[in-house]
Image (tube, coloured by chain):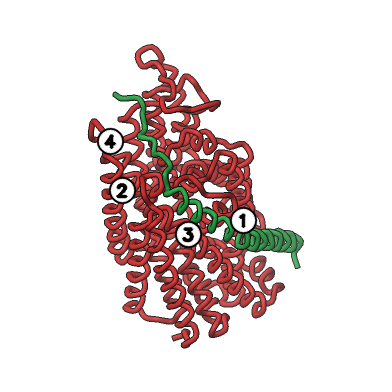
Chain colours: A red, B green
Amino acid sequence: MNFSTIDWVILVAYLAATVAVGIRAKRYVEDLSGYMVAGRRVRLSLGVATFAATELGTITFMYFSELGYVSGFSCFIIGILALLAYMFVGKTGFIIEPLRRLEVMTIPEFYQMRYSRRVRLLGGIILFLGGVLNMGIFLKFDGIFLSEVMGFGPDALVLIMTLMLLVVVLYTILGGMFSVVVTDYMQFVVLSLGILVALLAVLLSVDIREIGDAVVGNYGDAGVNPIVNPRFGWMFIVWILISNVAAGALWQPGTSKALASENPQVARKVFIYTSLTFAGRAMIPMFLGIAALAYFGPNESPTAAMPKLLGALTPRGLLGLLVAGMLAASMSTYSAYLLAWSSVVTRDVIACFRDEDFDERTTILITRFFAGLIGLFLLIFGLWYQIPDTAFQYLFITGAMYTAGALGCVAAGLYWPRANNVGAYSALALGAVAPLLFLLLEKSRATLPGWLAVFTDVNVSGLLSFVLAAAGMFFGSILTQRICPPRPVVGGLQNG
Amino acid sequence: MDNAVIVWLIVFAVAALIFFGVAAVVTVKGFGDLLALLRDSDVRGNGVKNGRESGNED
């Protein structure tokens, strides 16, 4: 066991403070917008803290460090692409500014304003399923991290993960976005300290020249050049760039932070300033993974190498701060995701089966119920799920099932007057086809005919999902303008 | 050390410095924003109107 008494004191104090603050924030919730978007009064710096904390979980650390271990410096390109994509969204206000102006609380609400209630229902179902399944593997990765860093067996880990999830579910159910924002701030501070501790511990113990030599010695040019690395290449770069723009503008947990901003201009600035952290968000865990390669050699488990390195190098006393930081990162991600997906299933799925919307009180009640249910699902799913071989690409391909169609629907709905319902249905359906084929066919790659085997290349399927969704929107709309004329946005868009 | 490795290490150093720089600024200024949000919510009683969305009906 790596944990000392002082580590435990830090960890328990942090968890207790989070519970107290998260539950106390409940008293600020009096209506639906208070519960779901914190009354739309989040200012710039707080918005950046809560957005950055949402986007940085232990899962992020795990899959980026795994990539660093198996591909060297060439994966750093992903951090640069994320920075460019989120900066683009912030600078141009692409999608987020008009959505904030429309005062939507969830992305599928826009489908009803621009298309129809049924498009909203379909979009809501795809978003909810894609989102919850995507989130399903988070807990497993947290378990591996804690196992390696703290040095516990699996029984204790189940207990810690259950406790952490209970805390998050409790304050998210009670306090909604107010609790999420307040605890996110605390968690951002703690996780930044935790990351600093981790980085310093590694930099003080592993020689920087050994790190460079390990990459070149094990991977050659592929370790420093993403174009020649067989995992990446141009197709990967184009796909990840588009995917980051789509995820930045349309991934509900993150976008809800822009929708909670006090006005559209602040929403844009939140994206601009948060984008500056995105290169570091990717490269710091990648660097730790590369350091693990230098420290342990190439025969360690790529997933477990980074946490094992931190467990070995971080001094006792600081280990508690590191684990508290990673738990903070996980909790802020879980809380935002729980609130996002429970809001979507309540407002965009269940309510759409009725002729009239639920009243505010009922909506909050159902949202709370689903936040608890999703928490239970995560616990069960996380305990038995077997992690796929390529976690980063798995997360992006499951995300593409929703983001490809959503990008076609929302971008065309906002910026192309001829977009109609048929185009929206086509974009949502076609956007999900290629990722779905990849997930179904990947295991039987060797037995497939050539034309079908192309879908088992994750980079091809990922990029294809965006191309098909765009084609579906364009041709679906153009060919059906007479029988299905486009409708204007209903809901108060100004200058949008 | 390989030139490409040196370039990536410099890029990494810049990215890490910006990350911790933004974190430091946001930690200080965000605390003020947090207090303002909670104070404002106390004063206004959280009375922002929720827009029951209108929209296209099938």
The amino acid on which the numbered mark 2 sits, given as a three-letter code, is Ile
Q: Which residue is mark 1?
A: A277
Rendered location of residue A123, percent (x, y): 36, 37
Query: Which residue was labeled with disc 4?
Result: A357
Q: Residue furthest front?
A: B43
Placement of A234 over or under A139, stated as above or below: above
Residue hosting label 3: A182
- Say what secondary structure mark 3 lies in: helix
Figure quadrant of residue A239: top right
Chain letter of the residue carrying label 3: A
Q: Earlier in the sequence, mark 4 or mark 2?
A: 4
Give me the residue at 71% from left, 58% from top.
B11
Amino acid at circle 4: Asp
Badge 4, how many Cα within 10 Å: few under 14, some, many 20+?
some
Question: Which quadrant holds residue A25?
Answer: bottom left
Q: Which sits earlier in the primary sequence, circle 2 or circle 3?
A: 3
